[in-house]
Image (cartoon, helix red, strand yellow):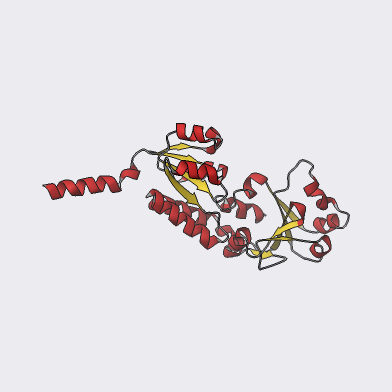
Amino acid sequence: MLRTLGLIMMTCMMSANAFAQRLVSLNPCFDAWIPQWLPKSWDFVPSTVHGNRLERILAAQPDVVLYGTYTNARLVAALDEATQMVLVDEPNSWSQWQRSLTTVGEALQLEDEISRWAAEQEQRMSVGKNFQQDLLIIMPNQYSWGGSSFIVDMLRHHDVSVNVADEDVALVQIRLEQLIQMQPQRVVLDGFASDYARANDWLWHNALQPWLQRRQVVQIPTELSGCPAQRADDYLNKVTQQ
């Protein structure tokens, strides 16, 4: 009898995450992502509700808080004294993103839910196999993603050919004369705002405009480029759209 009761209690403890809990996000990139895999029995509080203010987060009485690599360290330390904190690592490669998902699933005891979501994301990215052009990604202030960046690794993992100015770094600044010597078939403008900004000036240079006009150009909106891991499928589908 006692052995049976002990087994029942252990089962209840192991399945605690199946019952209603409250999860709080500290990152805007998580706000649309988490509800895609979180069980309906859980309550979810997005970052827009509390604005990352400590008193508002504590008032929500979270059972667990998800935060990112660049979340304010003092806020994380203060919350760590009151609730369970789970880090979602900012990945530098596609394989690291998969490991990060596994770690989060284990921490929340939601391995099956997150594994299913990861498989669905992977399935939505199969379009890369049919994309034949090579591309180059450029950003404001003459920056481009290098070969060691998450974006380039993610695209290449899904059979998209990406030109880079430097294979050994994540972020590289390209001189104008260097850029116009590169010959990608498609140019991806990543993170450029529609409003005027000095960071965008080089797009209007007399030498760059003809170079751009000879190529297919795709614009990545800032809300997408700011969340490349959680929205990797959207990013890939956008850069490869016909």
Coordinates of residue 196 in the picture (x, y in percent): 79, 42
Q: In the rendered image, which quarter is residue 176 located in? A: bottom right
Up-down: is 66 above or below 242?
Answer: above
Residue 86 versus residue 218: which sits nearer the camera?
A: 86
Coordinates of residue 159 in the picture (x, y in percent): 60, 65
On the rendered image, what quadrant is the C terminus found in? bottom right
Most distant residue in the left direction: 1
Q: Is residue 63 left or right of residue 75?
A: left
Residue 236 versus residue 154: which sits nearer the camera?
A: 154
Q: Is residue 166 left or right of residue 7?
A: right
Residue 5 versus residue 205: which sits nearer the camera?
A: 5
Q: Is residue 217 left or right of residue 109?
A: right
Coordinates of residue 118 in the picture (x, y in percent): 47, 54
At x 45% / y 44%, what residue is drawn? 80
Most distant residue in the right direction: 206
At x 77% / y 61%, what residue is drawn? 174
Residue 175 versus residue 122: which sits nearer the camera?
A: 175
Coordinates of residue 194 in the picture (x, y in percent): 75, 42
At x 51% / y 46%, what residue is drawn? 67
